[in-house]
Image (cartoon, rainbow, N blue to C red):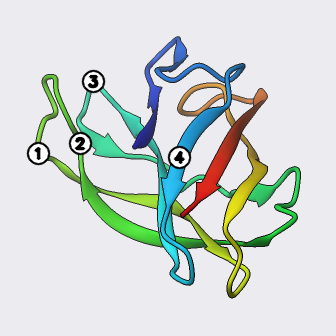
Amino acid sequence: MFRILLAGAITFASLAPAFAAEKVTVPANRTSGISSFIHYNGDMCRGGAIPNLRVGKKPKHGKLTFKTVMTKLGPGRCKGVPVKAMAAYYTPDRGFRGKDAFSVSYTHDLYEGAAGIGSTSYSFDITVK
C-alpha cells in the first residue's frame, strides 16, 4: 500500500484517508512492510522530499522501523517513474499472535516550495497470524 502525496504548484492532496485505520494482516515472527509514503510533483513526474516519518502511537506487541526505498509511481500520467519513498516496517514480538495497533505521522511542505507546513497521520490495526 502506498501513501502518495502529490506536490503541485498550488495544491496539496493526500490520496489516502487519514481518519480511518488501515487493517493489515502480517505473519508472526517476521518483519513485514506495512506502507510506503511518497512525496512527488505530478506536473513534472519527479520525486520530492522523502517524508520524515515518526512513530505516533507505539505498537504494544512489536516494533516499527522506517527505511528509504525505491519504488515506481502507480496509475496516471507518471506511471512507472522511479522515485524514493519512505517505507514503514512492523516486526511483532517473538511468538506474539493477535491484535496490535500503531500510528505513523510526519510533517511536510504544503506544496513544493511552500513556506507552510502540514502534518499527516495514519493509523494501522494489525493482526499477527
Please give the residue where the numbered disc 4 appears in the rendered image.
24
Crowd rating for badge 2 (residues with CA inside 10 Å; few <14, some 14–19, many 20+):
many
Dot 1 or dot 3: first in sequence order is: 3
Q: Is residue 61 left or right of residue 40?
A: right
Dot 2 or dot 1: first in sequence order is: 2
Q: In this view, does 57 lie to the left or right of 39?
A: right
Q: Label 2 amino acid?
A: Leu
Residue 57, percent across and down? Answer: 88, 51
Please give the residue where the numbered disc 3 appears in the rendered image.
43
Residue 18, percent across and down? Answer: 67, 24
90 or 45: nearer the eye? Answer: 90
User: Mark number for residue 73?
Assistant: 2
Q: What element carries label 4?
A: strand
Measure the C-alpha gap from mark 1 to mark 3: 15 Å
Q: Is residue 3 left or right of residue 80?
A: right
Quadrant where the image shows the N terminus: top left
Residue 120, percent across and down? Answer: 73, 33
Look at discs 3 and 2 and give the one toward the viewer. 2
Q: Label 1 amino acid?
A: Gly
Q: Label 3 amino acid?
A: Asp
Please give the residue where the numbered disc 1 appears in the rendered image.
80
| Mark 2 and mark 1 residues within 8 Å of each other at the beta carbon | yes
Look at discs 4 and 3 and give the one toward the viewer. 4
Q: Residue at x 76, y 73 (%)?
A: 62
